[in-house]
Structures are given as structure tokens and as C-alpha cells.
Image: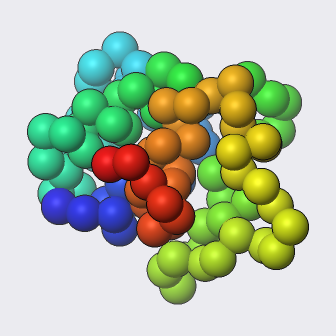
Amino acid sequence: MGREEVRAALERMDDDDVRRRIESGDLTDLGDLDLDESEREMVNGAALDYPEVVGFAFSTFGADVTGFQKIQPGVDLTQKFAPNPTYLSAVQYALHEGSKW
């Protein structure tokens, strides 16, 4: 359980097919991740609230394979994802950035 698993789930949502399955409640693609019930709900909510921006991917603004990477200075996530508050909360949780979770 934890932030690392939520980050991994967000990364997997970069794949449209995986995200669609998660949106429908099918978390099979996340089977190897140790998510507790609130994290599963968070990931499902993030999939439903995924930004509708051509070419968008979680990895384009904050994730890297070595672990948590700080958001580039000057990038205000609250402005960038204001229309997507559920997705923003999951990102903040995954990246340790002042999350309400």
C-alpha cells in the first residue's frame, strides 16, 4: 500500500485501454499493486477524472522510473489540473505534494 503504488497506477493510466478498464472498475491491470480500499477508490476516481488533453500522460510532468521526481519549478499543479480535482488529488498523493488524502 502507498504512494508508490498510486504513482505506478497513474503511470499505467497513460495507456488508454488500461485507463478505460480502470474507469469501468476493472482493476485487473493493477493486480500486482498493493492498494488499500481508499487508494483503489482514488485510482478509480482519477481514471474517471483523467484530463482530456491530446497527448497527455502522467509521465510528461512528474514521474520517472527512479521514483518520485519533484515537479519542475514553476509548475502549479492546482492551476494545471483545476478542472480535474480528483485526478489532481491522486497526483498530489502519489508525489507527496500537500495531498488531502
Answer whether residue 20 is visible to the viewer in this image.
Answer: no
Which of the colour schemes (rainbow, by chain, secondary structure, one colour) is used? Answer: rainbow
- Quadrant in the rendering for residue 80: top right
Query: Number of numbered discs present?
Result: 0
User: Which residue occupies the foreground of this view, 89 or 45?
Assistant: 89
- Give how far across and how far down residue 64 sits, in percent: 60, 74
- Is residue 10 toward the left or the right of residue 42 in the image? right
- Give how far across and how far down residue 22 sits, in percent: 37, 27
- Is residue 63 toward the left or the right of residue 67 in the image? right
Q: Residue at x 44, y 54 (%)?
A: 99
- Give how far across and how far down residue 9 sits, in percent: 40, 50
Q: Which residue lies furthest to the bottom in this view?
A: 66
- Is residue 12 toward the left or the right of residue 39 in the image? right
- Is residue 2 toward the left or the right of residue 89 in the image? left
- Give how far across and how far down residue 71 sits, in percent: 70, 70
Q: Residue at x 70, y 32 (%)?
A: 82
- Quadrant in the rendering for residue 94: bottom left
User: Which residue occupies the foreground of this view, 30 or 46?
Assistant: 46
Q: Residue at x 71, y 51 (%)?
A: 77
Image position of 4 with respect to 51: above or below: below
